[in-house]
Amino acid sequence: MNGDLGGFVLKPDQMQIVNPLLILLLVPFFEAVIYPAFKKCGLLTPLQRIGCGLVLCGLSFVVSGFVELALEVIKFLIFYK
């Protein structure tokens, strides 16, 4: 795994901490900024939030599938080069 992030190199064993850190950063951000902005516009009841999360989760799987397909093509080209 290439963990090069510009001037910082993230090692594979350090990758485990990224998910909890993102949760700790994004949950307060959503509660303080995103959800109040949607509420002010009259959008996103709790049930609509669940639905939006479900749609975003599905889209993330679709995107990861396309990334995997692109990686398989690259692996094939490198292997048979």
Image (cartoon, grey):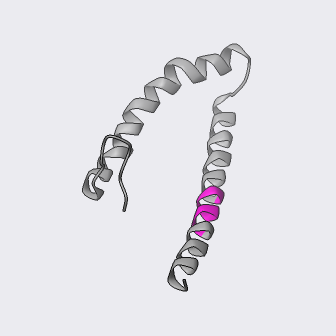
Residue occupying the far top of the picture: 40
78 shown above or below 45 = below
Q: Is residue 19 left or right of residue 31?
A: left
Quadrant where the N terminus is found in the figure: bottom left
Residues 50 and 80: in front is 80
24 shown above or below 72 = above
- Picture coordinates of residue 65, whole percent (x, y): 62, 64
29 shown above or below 14 = above
Residues 79 and 40: in front is 79
- Picture coordinates of residue 60, whole percent (x, y): 60, 52
Give the number of callouts: 0
Quadrant where the C terminus is found in the figure: bottom right
Residue occupying the far front of the picture: 81
78 shown above or below 64 = below
Residue 8 falls inside the magenta stretch: no
Magenta span dominant secondary structure: helix
Q: Residue at x 59, y 62 (%)?
A: 67
Residue 64 falls inside the magenta stretch: yes
Q: Residue at x 32, y 40 (%)?
A: 7
**Res. 21 image quadrant:** top left
Q: Which residues are magenta?
A: 62-68
Q: Residue at x 64, y 46 (%)?
A: 56
Residue occupying the far right of the picture: 42
